[in-house]
Amino acid sequence: MQESPLPSRRMPHRPDRVNVLGVGVSAISTRDALAVIDDAIAAGERSYVCVTGVHGVMESCEDPDLRLIHNRARLVTPDGMPMVWIAWLRGLRHVERVYGPDLMIECCRESVAKGYRHFLYGGAPGVAERLQARLQERIPGLIVAGTFTPPFRDLSEGEEREMLDRIAGARPDIVWVGLSTPKQERWMARYVDRLGVPVLIGVGAAFDFHAGLKKQAPRWIQRSGFEWLFRLSAEPRRLWRRYLSNNPRFVWRYLLQLCGFTRYEIVGDPQR
């Protein structure tokens, strides 16, 4: 997948990345992420942002195509304290957790004065509409130009055409994608060049959180690095395999990388 060249416009700065098992995680704060998104919109890019923690990295370890999708992203935000701690180990003390639900709210707040148009793609039936209502109640003046709830399967040709037409008609600056990892990353990579939208941002569970359908962990738990335990206790049948399998394997693999026993390249990094 190639990014569309824009020779007449200034290309925004790409932040440095930290190599986490071959995934280039952007060394950023939330303010940095907002600035990069602004730059991408101003430049008229066709780009996407992956919001990635341990789950996304481990899925990428098993799937080279998914790893390439992450590494070609405009940003891979450190959504999870392990990503932040790894950056700190590298001396990048300015890095902070760029959590998908928080990024969504902050970006929406700042977008009001700038007139950005938003589109909500994903969620179960009725979730995107509920999310739209709650966001616009919480953030007066927010422009949500449209929503689309896909089926839990691949789109038919007619459904794909309807989706593309609806997004094109809404003329959004940002499409928020709530499909969960890795489905949302694959969707963004597939459609980034076809939609003509400056920024696609995959935020997964943020749709359910901000729609009021699922409870977020308290802030102190989020900062402690144990949000996974809070979510596991809330949805054990759905999440047990993700956390109880991925987390120990992640720690072991990263220790091998840190000690130099295993080496990874950030294949597909657009900075290289």
Image (cartoon, helix red, strand yellow):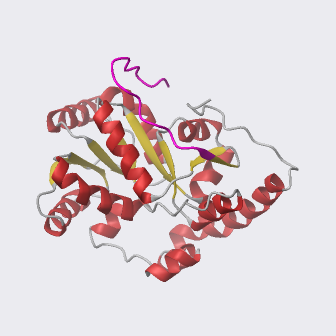
Q: Is residue 205 visible?
A: no
Q: Main secondary structure of the magenta part?
A: loop
Relative to residue 189, is residue 253 depicted above or below?
below
Q: Residue 160's x, y, as percent? A: 29, 33
Q: Residue 12's x, y, as percent? A: 41, 35
Magenta stretch holds residue 263: no
Q: Quadrant of the C terminus?
A: top right
Q: Residue at the top extreme?
A: 7
Q: Is residue 42 left or right of residue 4?
A: left
| In the foreground, 151 or 107 | 107
Q: Residue at the left extreme?
A: 141
Magenta stretch holds residue 3: yes
Residue at 86%, 50% in the rendered image: 260
Q: Is residue 59 left or right of residue 33?
A: right
User: Over which residues does the magenta segment extend?
Assistant: 1-17
Relative to residue 71, is residue 121 depicted above or below?
below
